[in-house]
Amino acid sequence: MDKLRVAVVGLRFGRTWMNGFLRHARCELECLCDLDTVKLAQMADEAGPRFTTTDLDAVISCDTVDAVALFTPAPLHGEQSIALLEAGKHLLSAVPAALTIEQCRRLVTAARDSGRVYMMAENWPYEPSVLKAQELYRDGKLGRIYYGEAEYLHHMESSWFDAEGHPAWRHDFPPLLYPTHGLGPYLHLTGDRFVEVTGYAVSGERPPGTETETDWLQLAVLRSERGTLFKLMNSFCNVHPGGHYLSLYGDRGSFETGRGKEGRFVATYWSHEDEPVEMHREKCEYPPLPEYVEGMGGHAGPAVRIVEDFTRAALDGEPSTIDVGLAANMTLPGICAVESIKTGRTVEIPDPAAW
């Protein structure tokens, strides 16, 4: 196969990825797919794919589509991913991988049985501050990580209702079902997996702006196979500026990102042999990026690298950076944390390697 013929499904967030595949020297933009006919026509004028459709089944059955970049709403990822893999398509999926344990199980099985590449487009392992953490860990500056924390604050109130005023999928979406931004960097870094989780939820007196039954904030306390403790806090409704945060405590050093808008680009760290005994602060940048990222939106930096890694995996047979096993290990803790909140009990997290 000389070039990877790609369909992009879901053009709200998918526009970034459309531009990435459109401009990649080893890819051809074969198809665009979206239910919104106006958006579909606009993106087709911009990108010039070979064909467009509003029907995912047309993508599934198309022999000229080798790979699909799936950027539909989160509740659809599991079943759509399974169908695409079973149809023999290489698949790059938005996060999370799925919303139930059974979907994760079927997804792992479908990827294994199809022999096709599955990669989850989790962007945080590609962000500059996390790349610094990878460098420190690789160089032994952190040692064995025994504790970590992550936060993901994102104001989603404006997306709770559609244009007609009906509740959209984000309206009562549990925040911890979107765990991969917080857990992904640690799992990608170490190869560890989480084995049990206890979840908690809390809310203010009323949501700012409109009514919803979703928890304002959900928190998970996790234990890993290697004994690491990890605290994850997610919130889609809050009176606080949005942003990301990650901290890692190792037996030779520690690391943390900046907070809020500095989460992507500021790293502070210290190793036990460093003098003076204080955290170093470093402003981090993306590796050199192609000029065309100007047309790829706010996620362009990691998207370029994800597109490159996925294309190389599909065309050259290299392992994908975040394969189906790692994607399941990033997704399952959130599913189990929500179950823990419902039952009030600690929940054991399944091991995808056993499926």
Image (spheres, helix red, strand yellow):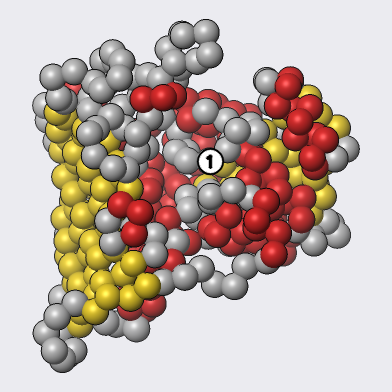
**Category of crowding for the residue at label 1, using alpha-carbon neighbours closer than 10 angstroms: few (below 14), some (14–19), many (at least 20):** many
Which residue type carries mark 1? Ala
Q: Is residue 131 left or right of residue 46?
A: left
Q: Residue at x 34, y 58 (%)?
A: 263
- The residue labelled by disc 1 is 94
Residue 72 location (% of width, % of height): 57, 30
Position above or below: 17 against 32? below
Residue 28 location (% of width, % of height): 82, 50
In this view, the residue in front, 34 or 81, is: 34
Position above or below: 240 against 271? above
Residue 23 location (% of width, % of height): 76, 56
- Find residue 256 and report its image quarter: bottom left
Q: Is residue 100 left or right of residue 126?
A: left
**Location of the C terminus (image quadrant):** top left
Q: Secondary structure at mark 1?
A: loop
**Location of the N terminus (image quadrant):** bottom right
Q: Residue at x 45, y 33 (%)?
A: 98
Q: Residue at x 70, y 59 (%)?
A: 292
Residue 264 location (% of width, % of height): 39, 60
- Find residue 338 and report its image quarter: top left
- Find residue 284 and report its image quarter: bottom left
Q: Is residue 289 left or right of residue 28?
A: left
Q: Is residue 11 visible?
A: yes
Q: Is residue 196 visible?
A: no
Q: Is residue 137 left or right of residue 293?
A: left
